[in-house]
Structures are given as structure tokens and as C-alpha cells.
Image (cartoon, helix red, strand yellow):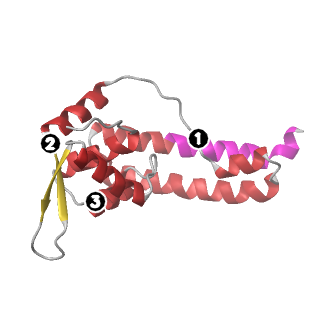
Amino acid sequence: MAHVRLTTASFLVLGVIDKLGEASPYDVKTEAARTVAPFWSVPHAQVYAQCDRLLEAGLLTQVRQESGRNRRVLALTRDGRAALREWLDDPEFVPVEARERGILKLWFGGHPEVLAPVQLGEHEKTLADYEELARSVGELLTSGQREALEFGIRYERMMVDFWQWVQHRDERD
């Protein structure tokens, strides 16, 4: 097995393939977009590159499906499963890296009266989507998936509160 430095994107790929049992790189990309993208996005090209790196490192195995488009299907090897388990069991704290474009614009002098209504509306929409998801399929989620969804709900509530606060800046000054 070749030694490779594993990143969060590596573990995202391992985790998605583990949940699906086996998957093509396209399946990984699609499933990641469907499930974890709200709290952890990864560029599509990076998914394909990670699949290749993990395959080369012996953490994934590949089978070519002859039917159809000769697509490759990946599965975790014993080493891949062990690496994923070790990462899942590691309690290391890594600070959150917030990447809110609206906040960056405020920092550099963006106009709150222009930014706040749009940001507020988008965060309210996302919050409503997450709350609907919790109502409609919340009981079908694993506890970890439900907790991640709850994080999204709480985050969006916080962002709604923040942008309402920004919107009422004149009342504070």
C-alpha cells in the first residue's frame, strides 16, 4: 500500500462509498451533492482525484462493469475501512472555517442595506428547506444524519438572526 496523506475530502469519499457499499466516482459526486453538500462541499474534480488517489493507496478497490459504459465501481478495502474507522474515532478538534460571502463583503465595506435583504431571504429559504426535510424524513435518518441536519437548522437560524441584526443597524447606531 502506498502512503498517502488523507484529507477531509479523502474521508468524505471513503464515507460515501462505505454508506453506498460500492460506487462509481460519479455516484460519489452525486451522493455527496445530495447529502453532505450543505455542510461540506467538495468540488466535483476533487472527488474524481480523491478516488484515484485512494485507489492508488490501496484504500479502494476497483471493478470495471462491462455492461453499459464500462464504468468503474469502487469499494473500500480492509485498509480503507480501517482508515475510515480510525478517522471517525479521532476526537481531534478542527476550528470551523466559515466561508460566508456576505460576511466577507460586509468586512470590505459592502452596503448592509443591499446585502442584508438578499442574505436574509436566502437563509430563511434554506432554513425552511431544512425544517421541511426534518419533518418529512427526519425519522428515517440515522442519529448522526439527524444531528447534522439539526446543525444546519441551528446554523441557518443563527444566520437569519444575524442578518436581521445587520438589517436593523440604523436602530442600533
Identify the residue at image location x=27%, y=49%: 16
- The amino acid on which the numbered mark 2 sits, given as a three-letter code, is Thr
Q: Secondary structure at mark 1?
A: loop
Identify the residue at image location x=48%, y=44%: 153
As drawn, 131 above or below 6: below
Q: Secondary structure at mark 2?
A: loop
Q: Using residue 124 as the reference point, say whether residue 37 is left or right of it.
A: left
Q: Earlier in the sequence, mark 2 or mark 1?
A: 2
Identify the residue at image location x=37%, y=37%: 147
* Picture coordinates of residue 113, whole percent (x, y): 81, 56
* Picture coordinates of residue 85, whole percent (x, y): 23, 31
Give the foreground label among 2 and 1.
2
Q: Are marks 2 and 1 in contact (CB under 8 Å)?
A: no
Of residue 10 and residue 34, the one placed in the foreground of this image is 10
As drawn, 83 above or below 159: above
Looking at the rendering, which quadrant does residue 172 occupy?
Answer: top right
* Picture coordinates of residue 137, whole percent (x, y): 31, 53
Q: Earlier in the sequence, mark 2 or mark 3?
A: 3
Of residue 56 and residue 151, the one placed in the foreground of this image is 56
Q: Secondary structure at mark 3?
A: helix
Judging by the rendered image, the residue that carries numbered circle 3 is: 25
**What is the span of residues highlighted in magenta in the rendered image?**
154-172
Q: CA distance from mark 2 to mark 3?
A: 16 Å
Identify the residue at image location x=78%, y=59%: 114
Judging by the rendered image, the residue that carries numbered circle 2 is: 77
What numbered label is drawn on residue 72? none
Judging by the rendered image, the residue that carries numbered circle 1 is: 98
Q: Residues within 10 Å of mark 3 (few under 14, many from 20)?
A: many
As for residue 160 lying within the magenta part, the answer is yes
As for residue 11 lying within the magenta part, the answer is no
Give the foreground label among 3 and 1.
3
Q: CA distance from mark 3 to mark 1?
A: 27 Å
